[in-house]
Image (spheres, helix red, strand yellow):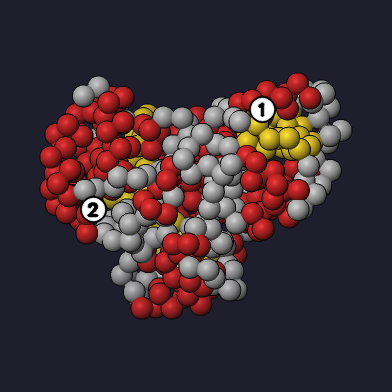
């Protein structure tokens, strides 16, 4: 199979959560355990840091990888979803897995994958772990896909577990309240392994403390630290993520990381890891900013930062996925903006007409467009040089314009 045929086959096997939504979510580790046994347990052949949480886990994972690369280590990085190319999900020292490795891996294990009926995510986790083991990485940063307790990545025994924060996202799988969601995320806390909690939130602190006590795991809250390092990642929210990354590095035993490595690592995240889509400024005059924030907590911070920008008028190219709780996110947006409603080009994308109608209830007014590109093109034509265009609402909207 060619690389394209391989990806088409992977996407077609079973629904893929990022594209399809709830039908693709599997609350079970049976398949991934069977697969890693078939692969001779690659996850036991490298050290790791496991990163979960509602917001910031991707940025924090990239920061950790960058710092460890600056310290001279060979670092694997597994994240999801991808923005443009599938190979973004699996990297070593910032370099994406070669396409031929993806094709040969799937070809070799196709019989098992078909028989066991693995999901797209389970296949990808197996591929990542196998690749990191074969590449003999010194350490891999593994980002949780969804939740924690029953996520396919949760078969590793890491050096440190990290939970950035808890917000109301994916409630149809993880629970309707913050403590319920925290319980699922706390599932990555392992016996005697230190756990770093990025933000101390009173609604969920007791959930983490109880789980850490049960597992006899030392627990640390990064938000109490006063260290402020600069980072090349521009969003205001990155201050919290950098504190979490620093606290995690300081609890990582057996690795030699200097203050200079931390400083340079945080200043070179994009260069070292090729991170995309976080408060990304695409152009000036008019200024175009895109960001992958897509839930209440993430959007609150991003929209607050937008308010600090100077502009004559602000234009929002906005699209969301169909399971998004609009009553939580739409009230955050300013009424004085001009809106361009669009549907991300995935089956799970919400109709631009439905989004437009719902937005009207919150006095957010604008036209709807059949595609993200058409909406963005129109916003560029409408905006003058002193305006700002913000593109977001979903990772998949951002992916279509960068």
Where residue 253 sits: x, y (%)?
35, 56
The residue carrying mark 1 is 376
Where residue 2 sits: x, y (%)?
25, 22
The reply, left or right, for residue 254 in relation to residue 278 is left
User: Viewer-proximal residue, 68 or 232?
Assistant: 232
At 53% from the left and 68% from the top, the residue drawn is 176
At 36% from the left and 78% from the top, the residue drawn is 214
- Circle number at residue 71: none
User: Viewer-proximal residue, 287 or 399?
Assistant: 399
2 lies above or below 11:
above
Q: Could one spot residue 341 in this view of the protein? A: yes
Q: Secondary structure at mark 2?
A: helix
377 lies above or below 108:
above
Please identify, in this view, whether the residue under mark 1 or under mark 2 is nearer the observer.
1
Residue at the right extreme of this rendering? 312
The residue carrying mark 2 is 32
Where residue 298 sits: x, y (%)?
62, 51
Circle 2 Cα neighbour tier, 10 Å, few/some/many (<14 / 14–19 / ≥20): many
The reply, left or right, for residue 225 in relation to residue 383 is left
Q: Could one spot residue 264 in this view of the protein? A: no
105 lies above or below 239:
above
Where residue 290 sits: x, y (%)?
63, 35
Which comes sooner in the sequence, label 1 or label 2?
Answer: 2
At 36% from the left and 51% from the top, the residue drawn is 24
């Amino acid at each position: 199979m060619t690389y394209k045929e391989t990806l088409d086959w992977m996407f077609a096997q079973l629904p893929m959560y990022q594209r399809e939504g709830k039908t693709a979510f599997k609350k079970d580790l049976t398949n991934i355990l069977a697969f890693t046994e078939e692969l001779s347990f690659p996850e036991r052949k490298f050290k790791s840091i496991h990163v979960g949480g509602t917001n910031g886990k991707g940025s924090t994972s990239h920061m950790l990888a960058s710092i460890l690369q600056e310290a001279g280590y060979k670092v694997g990085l597994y994240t999801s979803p991808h923005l443009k190319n599938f190979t973004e999900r699996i990297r070593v020292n910032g370099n994406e897995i070669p396409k031929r490795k993806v094709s040969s891996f799937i070809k070799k294990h196709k019989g098992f994958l078909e028989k066991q009926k693995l999901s797209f995510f389970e296949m990808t986790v197996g591929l990542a772990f196998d690749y990191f083991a074969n590449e003999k990485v010194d350490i891999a940063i593994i980002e949780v896909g969804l939740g924690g307790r029953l996520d396919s990545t949760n078969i590793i025994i890491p050096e440190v577990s990290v939970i950035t924060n808890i917000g109301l996202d994916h409630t149809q799988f993880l629970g309707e309240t913050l403590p319920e969601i925290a319980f699922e995320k706390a599932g990555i806390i392992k016996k005697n392994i230190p756990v770093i909690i990025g933000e101390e939130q009173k609604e969920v602190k007791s959930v983490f403390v109880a789980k850490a006590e049960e597992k006899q795991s030392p627990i640390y809250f990064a938000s109490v630290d006063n260290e402020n390092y600069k980072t090349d990642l521009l969003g205001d929210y990155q201050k919290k993520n950098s504190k979490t990354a620093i606290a995690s590095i300081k609890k990582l035993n057996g690795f030699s990381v200097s203050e200079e490595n931390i400083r340079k690592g945080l200043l070179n995240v994009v260069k070292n890891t090729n991170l995309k889509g976080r408060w990304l400024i695409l152009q000036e005059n008019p200024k175009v900013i895109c960001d992958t924030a897509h839930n209440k907590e993430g959007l609150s911070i991003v929209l607050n930062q937008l308010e600090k920008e100077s502009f004559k008028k602000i234009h929002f190219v906005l699209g969301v996925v169909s399971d998004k709780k609009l009553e939580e996110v739409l009230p955050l947006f300013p009424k004085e903006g001009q809106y361009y409603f669009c549907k991300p080009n995935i089956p799970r994308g919400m109709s631009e007409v439905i989004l437009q109608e719902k937005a009207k209830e919150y006095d957010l007014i604008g036209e709807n467009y059949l595609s993200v590109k058409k909406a963005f093109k129109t916003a560029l034509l409408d905006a003058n040089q002193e305006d700002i265009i913000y593109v977001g609402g979903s990772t998949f909207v951002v992916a279509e314009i960068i």
